[in-house]
Amino acid sequence: NGSVGSMGLSTLASVRPNFKLSAADVGGFVSDPAEELVAPSEAFRQRALVASRAQYDEMYKRSVEDPDGFWGDIASTFFWKKKWPTTEGKLYSENIDVRTGRVAVEWFKGGQTNICYNALDRHVEAGFGDKVAFFWEGNDTGVDATLTYKEVLERVCQLANYLRSQGVKKGDAVAIYMPMLAELPIAMLACARIGAVHSVVFAGFSAESLSQRILDCKPNIILTSSAVKRAAKVIKLKDIVDDALKTAAENGHSVGLCLTYDNNSALKREDTAWQEGRDVWWQDVVPSHSKECEVEWVDAEDTLFLLYTSGSTGKPKGVLHTTGGYMVYAATTFKYAFNYHEDDVYWCTADCGWITGHSYLTYGPLLNGASMVVFEGVPNYPDAGRCWEIVDKYNVTIFYTAPTAIRSLMRSGDEPVKRHSRKSLRVLGSVGEPINPSAWKWYYEVVGDKRCPIVDTWWQTETGGFMITPLPGAWCLKPGSATLPFFGIQPAVVDENGHAQTGECSGYLCIKAAWPGMMRTLQGDHDRYETTYFAPFKGYYFSGDGCRRDKDGFYWLTGRVDDVINVSGHRIGTAEVESALVSHPQCAEAAVVGFDHEVKGQGIFAFVTLLEFVEYSDELRTALVNAVRSQIGAFAAPDVIHWAPGLPKTRSGKIMRRILRKIASNQLDELGDISTLADTSVVDQLISLRGK
Ligand code: WT7
């Protein structure tokens, strides 16, 4: 079976770093010699799935010139109950140009498959049932569990049977609000097995946010856990769910069943709030179900999941992914970007509540038959050495995390890293925001001992999988660049007028043609899908990111160009934070911008205008921050509340965020032209209130 990989490869011998190479060594580079190029070692290259730039170029060329052949060959290595029909050799159809009709993308339509079957049954049937799927590592040291592929399959089947017994059918939405127990990916897979649509909500979102998502996708059942211990703190998840269900019911949607996993190490059963008739303990009902469960075969274009993400305006968007294209894309990107081999042990520190946890903690690795660590805790608990302790404990070979975690660990110095061996590590990944060159180098030199390529993966909830990423072993890296597009991805750097530029340039990052893993619509709002992603630059998918392309054709992501802030890799819409702030009865108006933050990447800076006669106070400041915590979640809490008697507005009443961004980052000599403001004195007023 092609995607399970080949057996019996020897583990990597120690490899010598080769930090600076001449341009001739690396093939195709026209870089100036002063630029840092980090070359793959010879040993790494020998085990690389794509071992040279030439090999990539050839594969890439085929992927864009003959997508049907390229993706068809890969898709054929998966199990299809019914193969996709081809009309004149085509296995996909697309219109991403709003000028030529509705945006519509389909891959493998008419083919029937099941992603859970491909992720689990296929490997068990191929004789890999005893291979470890999950090394589960608890929040507290010494608390762990191991689950083989066969065991995961059995648990998935039991839960799937239970869900079916409760009337969950193909196409029904199931909400999941769970901590990082192995039961979280198991719950996702159980939904997929019976064709239900999972909608995972990160268990750090507030009750208000959860209820909003429930009201949008209207599940009849929610899966949760009594509580979770995160670092030293117990969080009562069930209380949050109870609040959310109450709010949802008041607003017209009642969830009839709340299946609750008893996480008794965090909270005792008898201390968990309970509503008889609606709430059911997972352990009381699921284990009695059969360990076999018939698969629901679904169309490649049937919905697999919804995942809500923030936009620059309005309420969160329910990004909708379908089955076939997503499956093929998540698995293929995982395999090539991490240079996956069967003897790897993979660890992604993300939570299943985000897209990374869907594509690269659940589906991508399992589709490849990988063994992986599922970690309940946080990188710096009980201390800054926890990650490397876990790496050594499980002999992790591929480690995937976010720049914010790297920067925060970097602040604790090298000792907590060096006290652990880390000799198993082979590939280090990064995701969520641009990784600054200094964090890149620390990751490379200290964590990876100059031995492991840094795979900086640029992608989005909407793209389903990696878009721009190194293929380690195939070409040199430059610290801070996500390098080159993945197979089938045609980036375009577009200027204000929508023209794709050539050569070295900067502009708006767009994509020229459909790819298998892209979202198909926004739940219940296809118009918003078109206006947000396809209308801004006609003929392209617009990412919302800015980027630069250098003379080697490498891409350097420069961050969002819309009103979205990236805090510790979490995407937060300024509009959402503003609406949470103005929900406070004493807040008249709010304007939120991002500012550079040493650890989080971006911090949240909120300018707040109070109602007349309300006095500034520290209590009020705390109350405003708490309003955001309870409306969105703790991770969206503003770092700074800046009192603003007035906001800089144009004569037509539009807030000039450009000016606010400069004030927030203290670049007061770069305010630019303020003459178009209705009242220029507000700027001086704001400046005088800095730090007050
Ligand atoms: C936004 C997408 C993709 C999973 C995690 C976040 C930023 C993500 C990178 C990277 C520069 C990055 C972009 C993007 N981003 N990865 N490697 N380099 N920027 O998913 O919540 O959908 O956020 O995260 O700004 O648009 P998301």
Image (cartoon, rainbow, N blue to C red):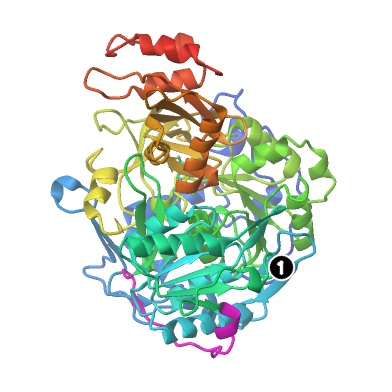
Q: Can I make out residue 331 in this image?
A: no
Residue 61 horizontal/vertical position (percent): 39, 50
Left or right? Give the position of 131 relative to 67. right
Q: Is residue 389 above or below residue 269?
A: above
Q: Which of 440 and 567 is in front in this view?
A: 567
Identity of the residue furthest to the right in this view: 419
Q: Which amino acid does label 1 sit on?
A: Ser
Q: Residue at x 68, y 67 (%)?
A: 136
Q: Can I make out residue 116 in this image?
A: yes
Residue 519 horizontal/vertical position (percent): 35, 56
Whether residue 595 appears in magenta in the rendering, the answer is no
Q: Which of 352 and 572 is in front in this view?
A: 572
Q: Residue at x 44, y 74 (%)?
A: 192
Which range of residues does the magenta coloring cover? 282-302
Residue 125 horizontal/vertical position (percent): 56, 84
Q: In this view, does 336 lie above or below 558?
A: below
Q: Is ligand 1 within 8 Å of the beta carbon of the residue shown at mark 1? A: no
**Crowd class of label 1 (few under 14; some 14 to 19; many from 20; radius 10 Å):** few
Q: In which quarter of the image is the C terminus?
A: top right
Left or right? Give the position of 134 relative to 215. right
Q: Which of 245 and 142 is in front in this view?
A: 245
Magenta segment, principal secondary structure? Answer: loop
Q: Name the residue under label 1.
A: 265
Identity of the residue furthest to the front in this view: 613
Q: Secondary structure beneath disc 1?
A: loop
Left or right? Give the position of 135 relative to 560. right
